Image (tube, grey):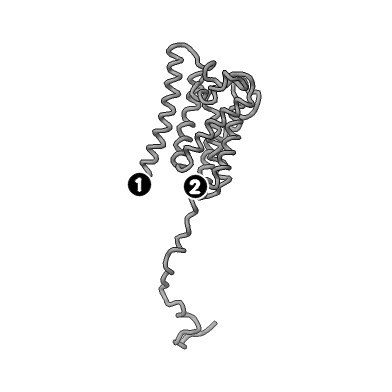
Amino acid sequence: MVKTSGRFIKSLKVGLMFLAIIWTVHMIQWVLNISFYQIGGVYPRTISGMPGILLSPFLHGSFMHLINNSAPLLVLTVIIIYFFKDVATESLLLIYVLTGVMVWLFARPVYHIGASGVVYGMVSFVFWCGIFVRNIKTIILALIVAILYSGMFLGVLPNQEGISWESHLMGGIIGIFVAYIMRDKIKSLDPPEQPKWEDEEPSRYFFDRDVFGEDSNDDNYWRT
């Protein structure tokens, strides 16, 4: 119990730390009435837009934009670090970096900011782990994220004004990719439990097993 609670607290701390950074960055922009999107946004296929691969998830266009990303970022970070602890760091880094790279390579030539691409990657990762790994834990987690974030699937549709649907789409694709390449490692680190009866001694019967059989020494009964 102590180990479990400690792991949960650790995963919660990581999620809260990431939120603290992006909220601090946004508050600085708001207080100073400036925007860092030209410095830290992803501008596809340009050298000046490459820093955005790493920096854009920390930038948001409004408080509403930031609020919409904050809750799923925290929940999904906790889920991945807690339930996929042995592959969490590697998986989150791949989702984070490769989503930015894909946006830089294939998105429209405008500035792309926000953590929603990473959020889509995380949702996709958890969901597709349920498909590829197919144990009880990953299936239940896949169902949970499907219920909580099913409405997000509309976000990958093109031609949404003011929304980087490319970030959503690329994040979703990267989530599938990371879940696929991690599937064997997740399986090996979380093998299925053996049914309990395989390890237990044979149960005792109230009567001897042959008390009603043909080997009974008592002939005062009728056979049927």
Residue 163 lies, in percent from the top left, at: 59, 22
Which residue reaches farthest top? 33
Camera-nearest residue between 205 and 194: 194
- Tell me, yes or no, if residue 172 can be seen here: yes
Reading the chain from its start, which is encountered first: label 2 or label 1?
Answer: 1
Give the quadrant of the C terminus: bottom right
Q: Is residue 220 left or right of residue 179?
A: left
Residue 28 lies, in percent from the top left, at: 43, 16
Please tell me which residue is depicted at 42% across the width and 65% down the height of the picture.
200
User: Residue 155, which numbered label?
Assistant: none
* Residue 221 position (above or below residue 160): below
Residue 34 lies, in percent from the top left, at: 48, 12
What secondary structure is found at the residue carrying circle 1?
Answer: loop
Residue type highlighted by circle 1: Met
Residue position marked by numbered label 2 in the rendering? 137
Q: CA distance from mark 2 to mark 1?
A: 18 Å
* Residue 29 position (above or below residue 89): above
Residue type highlighted by circle 2: Lys
Assess disc 2: are there few (<14), some (14-19) or many (≥20) residues with their C-alpha within 10 Å of its C-alpha: some
Residue position marked by numbered label 1 in the rendering? 1
Please tell me which residue is depicted at 45% across the width and 19% down the height of the picture.
26
